[in-house]
Image (cartoon, rainbow, N blue to C red):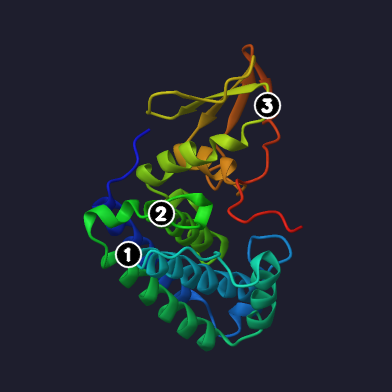
Amino acid sequence: MTSPSPAALQAELHKAAEALAAALDRLPDGGEKAPSTLPGWSRGHLLAHIAGICDALARQVEHGRRGEKVALYDGGVEGRNRAIDLAAGHSLGQHRADITAALHRALAAFDALTGPEWQTPIAFRDGVIYDAGLALWRELVIHTSDLDAGTGPETWNGAFCSHLFDFLAARVPTGTRLVLQPVALPPMGLGAGGSTVVVSGMVTDIAAWLAGRQPSLDSLRATAAGDGTDLPELLPWPSAMPDPK
């Protein structure tokens, strides 16, 4: 599984931003009050989170280019959650304005990078700016589906699914090896345990399952030793935030 080049990632970020904007345009007046697909979150909570993570990742780039490392969110996990709760009740128009401004800031930050700057160290995941770009890609694509605004994981492209397979390999339970068999694509292995489970289906359904989302094409099948079995319980999503002390 190969990672996109910085130029390819920039293009994917712009496509993901356009898809998010289109999803926002499809929401009816008052639609921000309806549930998202995320348990316990309205669309308003999700929209507040999207604006917040766009600003947070833009800040990683802006400070990183100045040789500074800053936390992803002011106030850590508690600060993040407080900001989402405070903004969740905004009107749909205010959410659109907030996300438009945050997307513009984030895309401008990544578009301004020179080649070597993609490898600039940042605080986020103790990584580099390129990692922040991948994170923004994940946030935009996955949360556009979470809005439940007419498009789901079936729209995720092959490059994005391939990235998720790589990034979410950390969710494979200890002792388990997953063999992924996407339709019409080569199989791939995740994990190194002694118990093998084969997961077959459409590539977008496999990626959605790994990401903790509902597969939209209902194509998944799991087998172990040639017999049908339940899909294994995955480990938590790899967190970018340190555990609160």
Total marks placed = 3
**Which residue is disc 3 drawn over?**
174
Disc 3 marks which amino acid?
A: Thr
Residue at 50% across, 57% down: 123
Residue that appears at 37% across and 52% down: 130
Residue to which mark 1 is pinned: 110
Residue at the spot 64% in from the left edge and 14% down from the top edge: 194
The mark lying in front, picked from 2 and 3, is 2
- Residue 66, above or below 99: above
- Image x and y of residue 114, in percent: 23, 60
Where is residue 193 drawn, in percent x and y? 63, 19
Drawn side of residue 131 relative to residue 224, left or right: left
Q: Distance between the residues labelled 1 and 2?
A: 14 Å
Image quadrant in which the C terminus is located: bottom right
Q: Which of the two residues, 224 or 100, is positioned nearer the viewer here?
A: 100
Q: Mark 2 points at which residue?
A: 121
Q: In this view, does 9 lie to the left or right of 42?
A: left
**Mark 2 vs 3: CB contact within 8 A:** no
Amino acid type, mark 2:
Pro
* Of the two numbered discs 1 and 2 in the rendering, the one whose residue sits closer to the viewer: 2
Percent from the top left, x then y, of residue 162? 41, 39
